[in-house]
Image (cartoon, grey):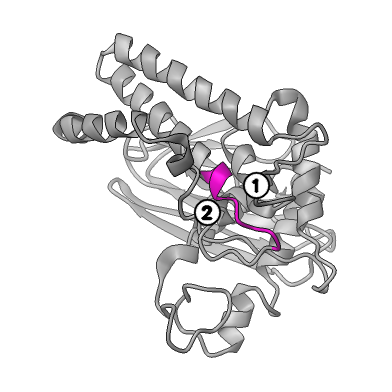
Amino acid sequence: RRSMEDFYSSTKQWVEFLEHVPRAKVEDGLSDWMNVETNGNVRALTGEIFLWRNYDAWAKINEILGKPGLADAYREKANKVLAHLNTEFLQKDGVYKGKEFGLTQCGQAMPLQFNLQPASATGAVLAGLVKSLGEASLSGPHMRTGMFCIKPLLFALTGKRDLFHLAYTILSRRDYPSYGYMLDNNATTLWESWFFSNNTYSHNHPMFSSVSVWFIQVLGGIRQKSTSTAYSTIVLMPRAPGPLDATLKGVNCTLRTLRGVIESNWTVIGSDRCTCNWRFSVPFGSTAEIGLPGKNITTVQGGGTHELFGVNLCEPK
């Protein structure tokens, strides 16, 4: 809250500036920087979503700071941008398309991340995303997004077992384009591009590192509840890829917070690839809500380490 108050004036100037930017400029930005998708210039779509995010965030800031008039005004502006987004780009078959792009991973994933599509279209948009993962020139599904859509893509594939496996599959590939390709070509830090560049793009760049959020929040299952401050309430929901994957033996995940260290470590023990032993710790001063597949939420108070044997960590089918 203090940061919102301290930077309120400068943030207000930025948002008011955006109101006067011509639509053509909004839709002429970075696109999904350094994607390698065919017909992947999604800048018109990403520009609209970035504009929506600014208005939506400003509405929330004003609501928190007790300025309901401004909050309502910018929520209305955000809704108008959202309506324009879906009218302009969402097709009847659930594919987001524009003049410069067709079916793309980013075009499908970014709306899904923020639930911008109409609820009735969610299944079709997700089906389009799954279809976009394949390309005739590549052997099997690959991730070809740029810096803005890695996280939306991975989180959109989290929820059902077959899609979860698909997310892990594209992350564990070693052929181009993939993180494994970087490693096999002597990368010790993340590149700015999926391909190797001798003299143009950086070889030490954090822009593809949003994958680590998926590792921590999904494989490790460590999240903060939306109403929590400084991890006062932790949500622990670890997930395993399941029977379609035989490579991941377990996860050791540690997150350091102001209240202390949160740990979530699990090891596969069952032939079904879902049965695991799970060990977790919750720091003093925090409360953890435990969410295991098919189980009711349970609450654990901070200040100790816990171990559960033979628990199912796979998403439902």
Q: Which residue is mark 2?
A: 31
Q: Which element carries disc 1, helix, strand or loop?
A: helix
Residue 140, percent across and down?
82, 69
Q: Residue at x 58, y 27 (%)?
A: 84
Q: Is residue 195 magenta?
A: no
Q: CA distance from mark 2 to mark 1?
A: 10 Å
Q: Can you say whether 154 is above or below 181 in the image?
A: above
Q: Which residue is mark 1?
A: 107
Total labels: the figure holds 2
Amino acid, disc 2? Ser
For the record, the magenta segment spans 38-46
Residue 287, percent across and down?
42, 35
Q: Residue at x 69, y 25 (%)?
A: 118
Amino acid, disc 1? Gly
Q: Residue at x 64, y 65 (%)?
A: 250
Of residues 123 and 291, the one nearer the viewer is 123
